[in-house]
Image (spheres, rainbow, N blue to C red):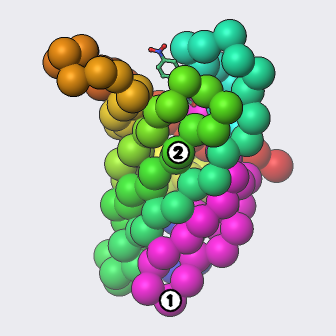
Amino acid sequence: PFQCVLTGLWRNDVGSRMQIDRVNEDGSFSGKYHTAVSLTENSIKPATLIGSQQLSEGGQPTFGFTVNWKSFSESTTVFTGQCYVGENGKEILQTMWLLREKVDPQNNWGATRVGTNIFTRTK
Ligand SMILES: O=C(CCCC[C@@H]1SC[C@@H]2NC(=O)N[C@@H]21)Nc1ccc([N+](=O)[O-])cc1
């Protein structure tokens, strides 16, 4: 059905906002990610996201997307997760992410953080 097509505006549990422009026939999409939090003092700027979602019949699709942060210490986040439709008919995105910062080889061991985020649609 039309639910869990990711086009639209989303907000997560740390207050970040994500705008997904359009989901193409092959499930690919792009948009903008406005993070509410960062690990650097640099001013936060919106970043481009690109990803793809399953469009199979069964609904409640899995998806993934990548955000390359600009103007932060050079870093990249990859999100992966699934869209669920609750009893109240509301969609939520359960996601986990890996945040990789650019480091010298000797610091490679500690350069990747992991976490979770839940997204809901904003009006
Ligand atoms: O700060 C950054 C870039 C912004 C990351 C925001 C993350 S993405 C996963 C989580 N969900 C969100 O909505 N927002 C957070 N990069 C950065 C800066 C400095 C360092 N550092 O270690 O100095 C590492 C990464």
Task: Label 2: state its secondary structure.
Answer: strand
The dominant secondary structure in magenta is strand
| Residue indicated by mark 2 | 68
Residue type pointed to by label 2: Asn
Whether residue 43 appears in magenta in the rendering, the answer is no
Residue 28: image location, x then y, percent: 48, 75
Q: Nearer the viewer, residue 8 or 99?
A: 99
Q: Quadrant of residue 54?
A: bottom left
Residue 69's disc number: none
Residue 65: image location, x then y, percent: 45, 55
- Compared to 82, does 57 lie above or below? below
- Compared to 43, does 16 lie above or below? below
How dense is the environment of label 2, judged by Cα within 10 Å: few (below 14), some, or many (20 and up)? Answer: some
Question: Which range is magenta?
Answer: 5-33
What's the residue at 63%, 19% (across, down)?
Answer: 37
Whether residue 12 appears in magenta in the rendering, the answer is yes
What number of labels is visible? 2
The reply, left or right, for residue 82 in relation to residue 7 is left
Residue type pointed to by label 1: Glu
- Compared to 101, does 7 lie above or below? below
Task: Label 1: state its secondary structure.
Answer: loop
What's the residue at 39%, 28% (across, down)?
Answer: 102
Residue sitting at the far bottom? 25
What's the residue at 51%, 79% (across, down)?
Answer: 1
Q: Which badge, 1 or 2, is on the more N-terminal residue?
A: 1
Task: Inspect this view and state whether residue 86 appears.
Answer: no
Distance in Å between CA atoms under marks 1 and 2: 24 Å
What's the residue at 42%, 68% (across, down)?
Answer: 53
Residue 25's disc number: 1
Q: Nearer the viewer, residue 69 or 113?
A: 69
Residue 105: image location, x then y, percent: 21, 23
